[in-house]
Image (spheres, rainbow, N blue to C red):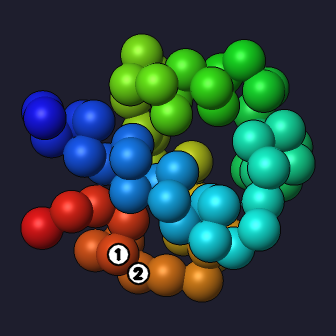
Amino acid sequence: MNELNKKVNKLKILRIKEGYGQKEFANLIGVSLSHYNQIENGKKDLIPPFVIKARDLLNCSLDDMVDQ
């Protein structure tokens, strides 16, 4: 599994663990559902503003968002 897929899989796991659906999470971080789906599927990069909003919503550190 490549590094981007590891990051995406970890993000999805954390999102589900916190009880967010894709649509709700996308709305909360300010992106469209289509854009967020592309992020989770590894088609779009994780950009800093997105990562920071996601981190805050998921109550985790940036390190928690990626597999080490």
Of tags 2 and 1, which is closer to the observer?
1
Vertical side of 47 occupied by 37: above or below: above
Where is residue 11 drawn, in percent x and y? 47, 54
Where is residue 46 drawn, in percent x and y? 42, 39
Asked whether, in this view, residue 50 is left or right of residue 1, the answer is right
Do the residues bearing badges 2 and 1 touch, measured as CB atoms within 8 Å? yes
Task: Give the structural element (helix, strand or loop) at label 1.
Answer: helix
* Residue closer to the observer: 59 or 53: 59
Instruction: Find disc 1 in the rendering and name its residue.
Output: 64
Q: Is residue 37 visible?
A: yes
Vertical side of 22 occupied by 49: above or below: below
Dot 1: few (<14), some (14–19), or many (≥20) neighbours within 10 Å? some
Q: Can residue 30 be seen in this view?
A: no
For the point 62% across and 60% down, which residue is it?
Answer: 15
Please identify the quadrant where the C terminus is shown.
bottom left
Which amino acid type is shown beneath numbered disc 2? Answer: Ser
For the point 50% across and 59% down, which residue is it?
Answer: 13
The disc at residue 24 is none
For the point 87% across and 48% down, which residue is it?
Answer: 24
Dot 2: few (<14), some (14–19), or many (≥20) neighbours within 10 Å? few
